[in-house]
Image: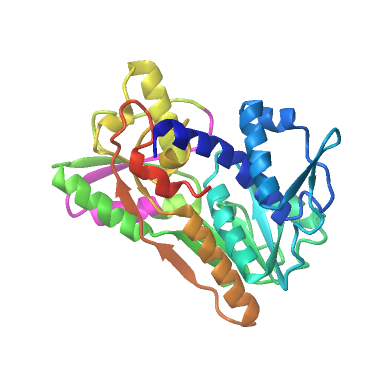
Amino acid sequence: MGMKKQTKKMENGKLIAYLQAMIAGGRFAAGERLPPLRKLAEQFELSNCAAHRAIQQLCEEGLLVLRQGAGTFVRGDAISAGKKTISVMLWDQTLIQSYCAFALHGLQSEAKANGWKLKIYFSHYVDLHETLNGADDFWNCDAAAFLGCYDMVDLESLNFPRPCVGLEMHRMVDGVFSVVTLDPYGAADQAVRHFRENGVKHVQVIYQAMPVHEVRAEIFVESWKRFGSSELILRTNESFSPIPGVDPDGAAYFTGGSAYNVAATMFRHKEGRILAANPNILSVDGKSLLFPNFEPSNTLMIDWRRAGEGVFAECVRRATHPGSAARRITIYPKLMMSRNPEKELPEDAEWAWPF
């Protein structure tokens, strides 16, 4: 597929996936009028023509109907009642730059194929308590999926009356949550092997104050200590500020793509070079292959759409087998080395884009 054609598909895909998810999750109800085309185009930074193509595709799929002079509406039969229901909590309401958007697409596809209904809710991590207390119908479901690192906040004080599955969570909250996440041992093993092959002696480990990132850092350090030294660097916020002490010419292991992108962006602005040109700078989660405006990276990633399919399967298992134990499900990552100095997606990266 040519780069220009691929880019058009990706641009349309952001809006298509958003509307599909909002319709499947009941955020846009049957018969409801969508926001104006111009507003949708602005929200997703698309041209009016690109947004119109997305609307046309969903009309052809039978989800929307375009009424001349009146606007675009959700078809009355577009939302299946479903035999059972999964409530889905997401932290990013735009679904534009979140791996959760890819996972949601996989979860949504499986739900549709199996006759399950989704209900979608949004809450940033720090607002989760307030959101759950204010959403009276959230627990009117058979299972709940939490897409994002919600275990970074206090969950023990909350009541969870239904089986729960968390994506990119580490803590299982005394067996309440099954968790689906990138395998931290698999990532550490591949990173150690890579650094050893390149003769690395010292690695800086950059992580965020979230359980899943802390565990990735700890496991890597433990795996690496037989072969060299390491230095832990905690990144405490999401602002675009330099990460002190990171040596762009040394070796570094970023436990998440967001922290890596901050460092790589600052490095490009300061030095005019691409951080990923150093093969010994590795990140985990593959966000650079999901979003064109992320800096290129050498990354350990999984197919996040398939992770969403795994979340659905675990929700079904626990909902249909009352009392079944929570499980920890890890997905072995793949090392993808950057081969795109001009900051374009590699031709073989389309597999990572599910839309």
Looking at the image, which is closer to me, 202 or 162? Answer: 162
Residue at x-position 31% and y-position 21%: 273
**221 in the magenta segment:** yes
Query: Residue 204 falls in which quadrant of the image?
Result: top left
Percent coordinates x, y for residue 9 in the rendering: 51, 39
Res. 94 in view = no
Region of the chain picked out in magenta, as a range: 216-239
Res. 14 in view = yes
Residue at x-position 48% and y-position 53%: 304
Percent coordinates x, y for residue 332 in the rendering: 36, 60
Query: In this rendering, would 134 be left or right of 176?
Result: right
Query: In this rendering, would 128 be left or right of 355?
Result: right
Query: Residue 6 falls in which quadrant of the image?
Result: top left
Looking at the image, which is closer to me, 248 or 305? Answer: 305
Query: In this rendering, would 349 be left or right of 128?
Result: left
Percent coordinates x, y for residue 187 in the rendering: 33, 54
The quadrant in which the N terminus is found is: top left
Residue 176 in the image: above or below residue 325 = above
